[in-house]
Amino acid sequence: MKEIFHEILNILHQNKPCVLCTVVHTKGSTPQKPGAKLLIREDGSSLGTLGGGCVEGDMWYLGTQILKEKGKPVFREYKLNEEMAARGGLVCGGTMYIFIDPIF
């Protein structure tokens, strides 16, 4: 986790934006637990993981859109069920709550 915070400082010293996605709460079986982080850089590259699959792909897409639009922080709930599996993700059966925080 320290690596992510060091990278945020590096990005800020370059006067560039980034987005930090953090799992803040989970219920049931999930691929990651609270505290897991995904940092999305302005160039679309990332550091860390939220567990992969559809959730991580959605967070990457949302993060890049927030950066382009200079958007505000958002909160998302993901229910990891059969609907998610149909989109190509793993079925864990739990729920993940993720805070998406742009850093400008």
Image (cartoon, rainbow, N blue to C red):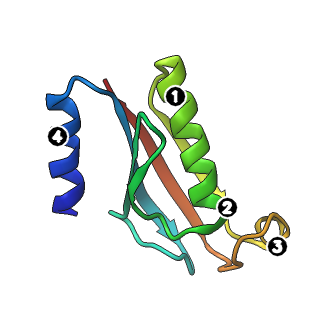
What's the distance in space between the residues labelled 2 and 3, CA to CA? Answer: 12 Å
The residue singled out by tag 4 in the image is 10
| Mark nearer the viewer, 4 or 2 | 4
Residue situated in front as seen by the camera: 15 or 103: 15
102 left or right, relative to 98: left
What's the distance in space between the residues labelled 3 and 4, CA to CA? Answer: 40 Å
84 left or right, relative to 10: right
* Residue placed furthest toward the top: 69
Query: Disc 1 marks which amino acid?
Result: Ile
Query: Disc 3 marks which amino acid?
Result: Glu
Query: Disc 2 marks which amino acid?
Result: Cys
| Mark nearer the viewer, 3 or 1 | 1
What's the distance in space between the residues labelled 3 and 1, CA to CA? Answer: 28 Å
Q: State which tag comes first along the sequence, 4 or 1.
A: 4
The residue singled out by tag 1 in the image is 66
> Which residue is drawn at the image coordinates 52% and 28% (left, top)?
66
Answer few, some or many: residues within 10 Å of disc 3's Cα (few below 14, many 20 plus, some between 14 and 19). some
Answer few, some or many: residues within 10 Å of disc 1's Cα (few below 14, many 20 plus, some between 14 and 19). many
Element on which disc 3 rests: helix
